[in-house]
Image: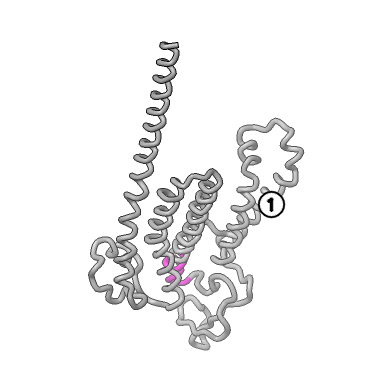
Amino acid sequence: MFGDWGHGICLLLGALVLIARESKLSNQRLGSFMEMLFGGRYVLLLMAIFSIYCGVIYNEFFSVPFHLFGGSAYKCQETTCSDAHTTGLVKYQDTYPFGVDPSWRGSRSELPFLNSLKMKMSILLGMTQMNLGIILSYFNARFFSSSLDIRYQFVPQMIFLNCLFGYLSLLIIIKWCTGSQADLYHVMIYMFLSPTDNLGENQLFPGQRPLQIILLLLAVVAVPWMLFPKPFILKKLHSEVILLLATFFLLFSLEILFW
């Protein structure tokens, strides 16, 4: 949820200094703290870039709103209004090009709106990261020719993750695009507690209830698929290897005995 392009720029400058002096610092004896920073210089660089990106979305510069793309798209409803945060606003120009409109700052809805936005952004970015990690595990398993990891690790993990949290990410995007008032907390909770009940005002699209039931069943199936087959198969393979070695040792011993 961290996103502030002012702090992000400071972090970026620090990471660039470490990278620019990489050859010199790598030959020096550093303290434990500096060694940790130097070892993670590229991680710090990525953190800074992502912080700047999210900070521009949240329109936060050292926790202060910044009119980076011009003024607000809204103005006071009354011509005598001098404070746009206490009187109703009307839209008078195009939507703010990128990120949060500055008029949200200081309003009564600022905290709930920004907390909700940051939480949803965290879910979307976290889902992207977790899917990337699982996809990389597939390429690792393929490189080492481990079909066992692909069948009983990669596939059920992808199914479980995307049937639950991938579906939640889809609901977030649909809610943003449609302006629905559906409560996603209730949608996800009652997807487990009462999957067959009518969704009512929490329905975002036609066919949502049967889709949720199918996704829930797939997620339930993926759990034992992910946990149980691989250990038993590995145990069976290990037992076969032990039996083969024992047989070979016995035959070798008999051959020596009768030589």
Query: Height in image: 111 above or below 226?
Result: below
Closer to the camera in the image, 249 or 149: 249
Residue at 42% across, 77% down = 179
Closer to the camera in the image, 134 or 153: 153
Residue at 45% across, 11% down = 259
Residue at 62% across, 58% down = 6
Residue type at numbered disc 1 = Leu
Closer to the camera in the image, 107 or 129: 129
Q: Position of residue 84 (x, y in %)?
A: 51, 78
Task: Name the residue at the front extreme.
Answer: 259
Dominant secondary structure, magenta:
helix
Q: Is residue 109 magenta?
A: yes
10 Å crowding of disc 1: few (<14), some (14-19), many (20+): some
Q: Position of residue 239 (x, y in %)?
A: 37, 32
**Residue underneath mark 1:** 13
Q: Position of residue 39 (x, y in %)?
A: 63, 40
Closer to the camera in the image, 4 or 233: 233
Residue 230 lies in quadrant: top left
Element type at mark 1: helix
- Residue stretch rendered in magenta on the structure: 107-114
Q: Position of residue 47 (x, y in %)?
A: 59, 53
Residue at 75% across, 40% down = 23
Task: Name the residue at the right extreme.
Answer: 24
